[in-house]
Image: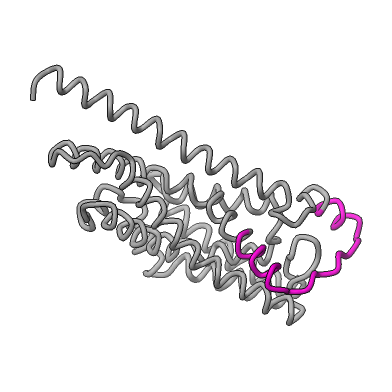
Amino acid sequence: MSIGEGSLTERVLRRDRRIVIAGLAAMTLLSWLYILAGAGSGVSVWHMAATSMAGMAMPPPAWTSGYWLLMLVMWWIMMIAMMTPSAAPMILLYARATRHAQNRERLRQGALPTAAFAAGYLLAWLGFSVIATALMWALERAGLASGAGLASSSRQFSAAVLMFAGLYQLSALKRRCLQHCRSPADFIARHWKPGVAGALRMGLEHGAFCVGCCWVLMTLLFVGGVMNVLWIAALTLCVILEKILARGPWLGRTCGACLLAWGALTLVV
């Protein structure tokens, strides 16, 4: 490769990196704005918080087909807002790897494989969102979740969720999934598949590991409130630190021990 070709490749890589970063940032920002605006409910999170603090109960809407769809979209966009920041290093590394592969094989697919990879990742979280929506319906019908923020109304249920989450944080399955999320280069090397279809499948595979790593933490939203923006932000920060810090696994285990203790105290206090 000549010097001119090398410089051109470097410029293209830098441009693609900026495009991917801008796209991920815009998607995350828009998702958070959607949540703050009330996730399509017509009631902002600030109004929900004020209503909850004033002790005013908001009657739950009927679960019509339209409301089911609204709740599914809410959960999915919430997962996009919470998980995209921690997935960004993997997506950026994939974008760089696929650009090198395209240059080597003289392909001109542009950013399509990267977009397919990100789409596959988000589709995995869509699957989780379907289950979360059904669980929310079941909890509301059972009287275990209520209020403006759809928080747990049962001390026993809250304690069970907290302790289960704590145990899962300490489990071997959690460690295995977290290791995949913390090792993007190793994942790409082991799971590489060419083309747009291959990228979509890789994104789904990575998303499955990510769901396996974080799904129990997401169930804590039923304890603190599905529409509690501070609780959402706290869980988002926990996920990010667990994945990017050098001592992230230690942080995850510490979090597990704290959740177990919190669950036990919830039962007795």
What is the residue that sits farthest to the top in this orientation? 4
Percent coordinates x, y for residue 181 in the rendering: 36, 54
What is the residue that sits farthest to the left in this orientation? 1
* Residue 64 among magenta residues: yes
Which is nearer the eye, 162 or 12? 12
What is the residue that sits farthest to the front in this orientation? 108
- Residue 30, quarter of the rendered image: top right
What is the residue that sits farthest to the bottom in this orientation? 142
- Residue 32, quarter of the rendered image: top right
Determine the residue positioned at 64% across, 66% down. Answer: 69
Residue 1 horizontal side relative to residue 252, left or right: left
Q: Quadrant of the C terminus?
A: bottom right
Percent coordinates x, y for residue 65 in the rendering: 68, 73
Q: Quadrant of the N terminus?
A: top left
Percent coordinates x, y for residue 163 in the rendering: 58, 72
Percent coordinates x, y for residue 114 in the rendering: 34, 45
Count of numbered marks? 0
Please, which colouring scheme is shown? Answer: one colour
Q: Is residue 208 above or below residue 181?
A: below
Determine the residue positioned at 14% across, 38% down. Answer: 106
Determine the residue positioned at 15% across, 22% down. Answer: 5
Q: Is residue 104 above or below residue 226?
A: above
Determine the residue positioned at 66% across, 48% down. Answer: 34
Span shown in magenta: 48-73
Residue 101 horizontal side relative to residue 160, left or right: left
* Residue 237 among magenta residues: no
Residue 63 horizontal side relative to residue 120, left or right: right
